[in-house]
Image (cartoon, helix red, strand yellow):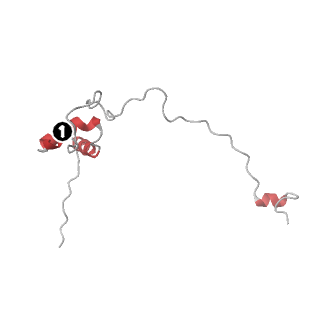
Amino acid sequence: DRKSEQVITPKGEKQRRLHKAFLRYHDAENWPMLREALKKMGHANLIGNSKQHLIPLWQPEGTGGEGKGKYSTRRPTVGKPKQTLTPPRPRKPARATTKAKRQQPGGGRQR
């Protein structure tokens, strides 16, 4: 008998956010959460300002704030939206089918 290895999946929202933050460790918005998690896990050695560290000690101004709501990490758009809807193009008249061409005098292929 082969026994399967038990795989733990993130169930809670906080744990899912943490997993996503680790996948996007390069995003400064995630650094405060990652610093806290790394300290709790005993990996504070990964926090620092050199290339060997995962997360820097400093936080860029205007990032890492605790937002509210489901989409708190998204920044509001300013000015025009990037995608605009264009009006539909006028349709061209349908081309005559081969059967219709055959019925017209002189229609169809010239032989």
To which quarter of the image does residue 56 belong?
Answer: top left
Q: Position of residue 110 (x, y in %)?
A: 85, 63
User: Which residue appears farthest toward the bottom when viewing the image?
Assistant: 1
| Camera-side residue of 39 and 55 | 55
Q: Residue at x 73, y 49 (%)?
A: 94
Q: Residue at x 28, y 35 (%)?
A: 29
Q: Residue at x 26, y 37 (%)?
A: 30
Q: Is residue 32 above or below residue 42?
A: above
The quadrant of the rendering that contains the C terminus is bottom right
To which quarter of the image does residue 71 belong?
Answer: top left
The quadrant of the rendering that contains the N terminus is bottom left
| Camera-side residue of 26 and 96 | 26
User: Which residue appears farthest toward the front when viewing the image?
Assistant: 50
| Camera-side residue of 6 and 26 | 26
In the drawing, does residue 85 fall left or right of residue 71?
right
Q: Position of residue 59 (x, y in %)?
A: 24, 31
Q: Is residue 57 above or below residue 43?
A: above
Q: Position of residue 97 (x, y in %)?
A: 75, 57
Q: Residue at x 79, y 57 (%)?
A: 100
In the drawing, does residue 72 fall left or right of residue 102?
left
How crowded is the residue under tag 1: few (<14 C-alpha within 10 Å), some, or many (20+)?
some
Q: Secondary structure at mark 1?
A: loop
- The amino acid type, in three-letter code, at marker 1 is Gly
Q: Which residue is mark 1?
A: 48
